[in-house]
Image (cartoon, rainbow, N blue to C red):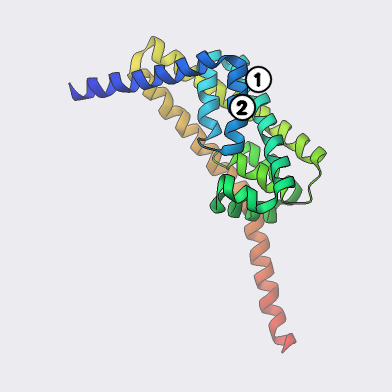
Amino acid sequence: MILEEISNFFIYIYNLLIYLVIWMGPLGFFIALILQAILAPIPSELMLFLGGAAYGPIVGGLVGGAGTAAGSIASFYISKRGGRPVVLRLVGEKTIAFADRWFERWGAWAVLIGRFIPFIPFDGVSYGAGLTKMRFRDFFIASTLGGFPRSIFYAYLGYLASQQINTGGLEAFFNTVSIIIGVILLLAALGYYIVTKKYTSKSVNEATNTTNASPQDE
C-alpha cells in the first residue's frame, strides 16, 4: 500500500513537470534554459531530460542545445562585464572556485572538455571563461561543439525514460533510469580519468623536479 502511494506520488510529480514543460512550449523552454544558465537554480541536465521527455529527442535536443548555447553566451558576457563580484552573487563562491581550478588545469580546452563530461557545472564553466582572457569566438565554438551533443544526449535519455513509464509503468521506468544512471556514471568516471590523468602526471613531475632541484639550490 505504501509503495503504491509512493509510486502514484512519483508519477504525479513526473507528469506535473512534463506538463509544465509542454505548457511553456518550445520558446518558453528555450527562455527557461537561458534563465537557468544565468541563475543556475537547478541542473541543466534535469531540464534537458524533461525537454526530451516532453518534445522528443530531436526537438527537445535542438531547442535544449540552442537554449544552453544562448545561456552560456549570456553567462560569458555577464562575467566579462560584471567581473568576479557579480558572478559570486549569481552562482556562489564554490562554483567559481571550481571554475578557477578547471581553467587553471585545462586552459583553452576547459570549455570543450567541460561540455562533454557529465556532472561538470555547465554554468560555472561559462562564467569562469568570462573571467579569463578567452576570446568570445573561441568560447562560442567550444561551447557550441560540446553543448549540442550533450543536449541531444540528455534529451534522448529523457525521451527513452518517458517511453518506458508510458508503456511499462513505474518499474520499467526505474529499470531504464538505473541503466541511464549507470551509463552516466561510467562516462563520468571515464571522463574524470582522462581529465585528471594528464594533470596528475604533470603534478607528480613538477614535484619530482622540485625535489631533485632542492639540493642544488642549497
Above/below status of 159 relative to 130: above
Residue 210: % across, % down: 69, 75
The residue nearer to you, when weighing 3 against 73, is 73
Badge 2: residue crowd in 10 Å (few <14, some 14–19, many ≥20): many
Q: Amino acid under label 1?
A: Leu
Q: Which residue is mark 2?
A: 151
Instruction: Name the residue rendered at 50%, 22% in the picture.
Output: 50
User: Which residue appears farthest toward the top when viewing the image?
Assistant: 167
Label 1 element class: helix
Above/below status of 52 relative to 119: above
User: Which residue appears farthest toward the bottom when viewing the image?
Assistant: 218
Q: Amino acid under label 2?
A: Ser
Quadrant containing the C terminus in the rendered view = bottom right
Q: Is residue 2 left or right of residue 87?
A: left
Residue 33: % across, % down: 60, 28
User: Does the residue at mark 1 contact the one at mark 2 (Cβ under 8 Å)?
Assistant: yes
Q: Which residue is mark 1?
A: 62
Labels 1 and 2: the sequence-earlier one: 1
Badge 1: residue crowd in 10 Å (few <14, some 14–19, many ≥20): many
Can the viewer see residue 192 in this picture? no
Quadrant containing the N terminus in the rendered view = top left
Residue 128: % across, % down: 67, 48
Instruction: Name the residue rendered at 59%, 43% in the picture.
Output: 191
User: Which residue appears farthest toward the left when viewing the image?
Assistant: 1
Above/below status of 7 relative to 137: above
